[in-house]
Amino acid sequence: MKALRVFKDLVSFLTIIPLAKDESFLENSARHMFLFPLIGGVIGLLTALYHSVCQYLLRKLFAILVIPLLLPKELLIEAISAGATVAFILILTGLQHFDGLVDLGNVIGLKKKEERDTVAHAWIVTYKGAFLAVFIEFMSFLGILLLSSFAFNALICSEVLAKLAMVTVAWFGKPSGNGLGSLFAKFNSKRKLNVVAYVISFSIVSLLFGILSIPLILMIFILGVAMERVSEKLFGRVSGDILGATNEISRAACLILIAIMVNL
């Protein structure tokens, strides 16, 4: 029963699926953050299935269309499927990670920490926040578009590793102050159990991409550490916005890197 409770709480935290019974799911999710990659695998599988269904239905639709097309039919199918899949991921995760990406862009260039804290918690979107968010999601779209027959495995892999990057940020971060990010850092800073997250991730990714799992996990480790440093410099602590932004940036980076490696 406890394992089921943990699973429900983690799914509730990382998606819009309301399985949690009460607000204690936040602390429970922080305590079991090392299982994030496992939930990432579930999210990735749902996303991969959605992408495959989109491709299937679009091929059926274009097979009966007789209107002239401006682009090659297969390219159009791949592009529409990729765009719909990015939208599906954002909806499934409730835009919470996307919001963190926007907030990160909003505070870039601000000199005072107090000003960065204020802007990060304000309901505003600056041109910098909008640009960063659109750019990162476009990179995810481009990665999916370039992956072709590897997209199914890559979508699973990218979600697993995006969650691993979040674990890495909290693992190397310093618990300080209040807020969601500090809660996760409190339970995960320098926590040896987080090695389990790497074991889970390596098991899943190596099953999907074999030897390519090594550069992928190495990239995620470096990216996670780098994002923690960014969080420390901007906010003086692990920020919830940085955790969300890390998820989005890591997904895009994984998809692009996989696309490059499989097309070499």
Image: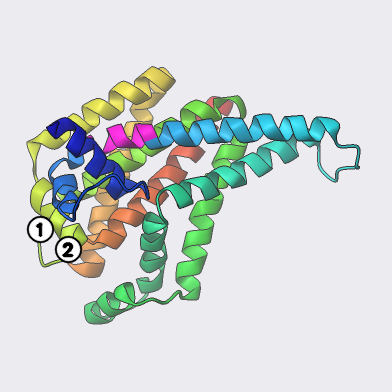
- Residue 233 falls in image quadrant: bottom left
Q: How would you classify the magenta stretch by its main secondary structure?
A: helix
Q: Nearer the viewer, residue 145 or 179?
A: 179
- Residue 156 falls in image quadrant: top left
* Sequence order check, earlier mark of 1 and 2: 1
Q: Which residue is mark 1?
A: 175
| Residue 182: image location, x then y, percent | 15, 59
Which part of the image, by quadrant, shows the N terminus?
top left
The residue located at (23%, 36%) in the rendering is: 7
Residue type at tag 1: Pro
Name above or below for residue 177 compared with residue 93. Answer: below
| Residue 180: image location, x then y, percent | 20, 60
Q: Which residue is mark 2?
A: 237
Q: How is the image coloured?
A: rainbow
Is residue 17 part of the magenta span, yes or no? no
| Residue 167: image location, x then y, percent | 23, 43
Residue type at tag 2: Arg
Name above or below for residue 18 compared with residue 109. Answer: above
Name above or below for residue 198 compared with residue 118. Answer: above
Name above or below for residue 245 compared with residue 65. Answer: below
Instruction: Report the magenta residues as a range.
Output: 35-42
The residue located at (81%, 37%) in the rendering is: 72
The span from disc 1 to disc 2 (Cα, nearest Å) is: 7 Å
| Residue 132: image location, x then y, percent | 47, 62
